[in-house]
Amino acid sequence: MSTRQSIDHEVYKVDDTPKPVLKLQIWQDHGMTPPDVDSVIEELREALKDSIASVAFAKTALTFFSSHIEELPRDIQKVFPKAYISDLFIRIDFTDDPDGPDSDTHTPASGWLRSEALEKLAVNGFVDHQLGQQWIVAFFAQWEEIFRPRLAKARGIAHADDIKVPLLGDLRRLRHYVVHNKAKVESNWPQKSTVLAKWFSPGDTVHLSGRHLREFEDLFPWTELRGP
């Protein structure tokens, strides 16, 4: 076990219950510098900015692809936007040619009929919903698995769960709906949510617009994260 691992997993016992201990003295005894609160928060700020920018660019691209498909001849029965593994683009083909130039090196990952593509790529359509829902799951995972534990260490807090952020508590509940309830808002949302209560009503499908993302960024409690 490495020095850092031994620090992260060091425990003490109270009533025979093992609990993690995170003390400045431990870091000093090992000749190490504890995480800096400002550095952790700055990295979190960059992660939030990058994640929102990524989903915003992806949402904007939906309109571009929809317009491109609209311009294709309507008498073509099948138009497959085929996503090729290892390629960072979507190729619009009229035929599904097994002897095409990419057939030996790439595997078609997906394909839609022209009408399906236009429907799924529409604003507030399937892909639009998927992008927002995936952002919820991905950003909450970053907070829960990376930044919350690091911030707890930087602030000298023994348990990461002791850092309470109502905004991210609401995001956790939205993640639950996406993963465990087919993205449908449950009846307990008005009672359980706090900061984002007005975003949805019971029975709604979880869907994030640009307005939601901007508001989430504006509501982020940077000062409170630094602690007293």
Image: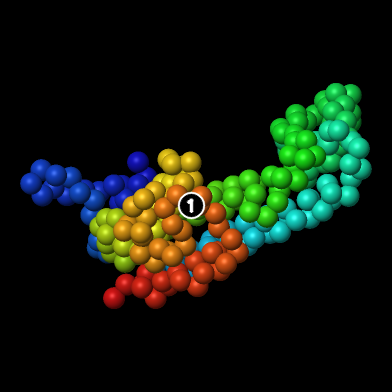
Residue lying farthest top?
98
In the picture, which quadrant includes the C terminus? bottom left
Position of residue 175 relative to residue 24, above or below, is above
**Closer to us: 153 or 174:** 174
- x and y percent of residue 78 in the render? 84, 33
Snapshot colouring:
rainbow
Three-letter amino acid code of the residue under disc 1: Asp
Visible in this render: residue 99? yes
- x and y percent of residue 92 in the render? 84, 41
**206 lies left or right of 119:** left
**Residue to which mark 1 is pinned:** 204
Badge count: 1
**Closer to us: 185 or 51:** 185
Position of residue 163 relative to residue 15, above or below, is below
Q: For mark 1, does the 10 Å Cα neighbourhood hold few (<14), some (14 to 19), or many (20 or more) residues? A: few
- x and y percent of residue 157 in the render? 27, 62
Residue at the image position 79 percent from the left and 55 percent from the top: 64
In the picture, which quadrant includes the N terminus? top left
Residue at the image position 42 percent from the left and 40 percent from the top: 180
Disc 1 secondary structure class: loop
**Closer to us: 88 or 29:** 88
**60 lies left or right of 165:** right
- x and y percent of residue 62 in the render? 72, 53
**105 lies left or right of 133:** right
Residue at the image position 48 percent from the left and 41 percent from the top: 182
Residue at the image position 63 percent from the left and 54 percent from the top: 124
Visible in this render: residue 83? no
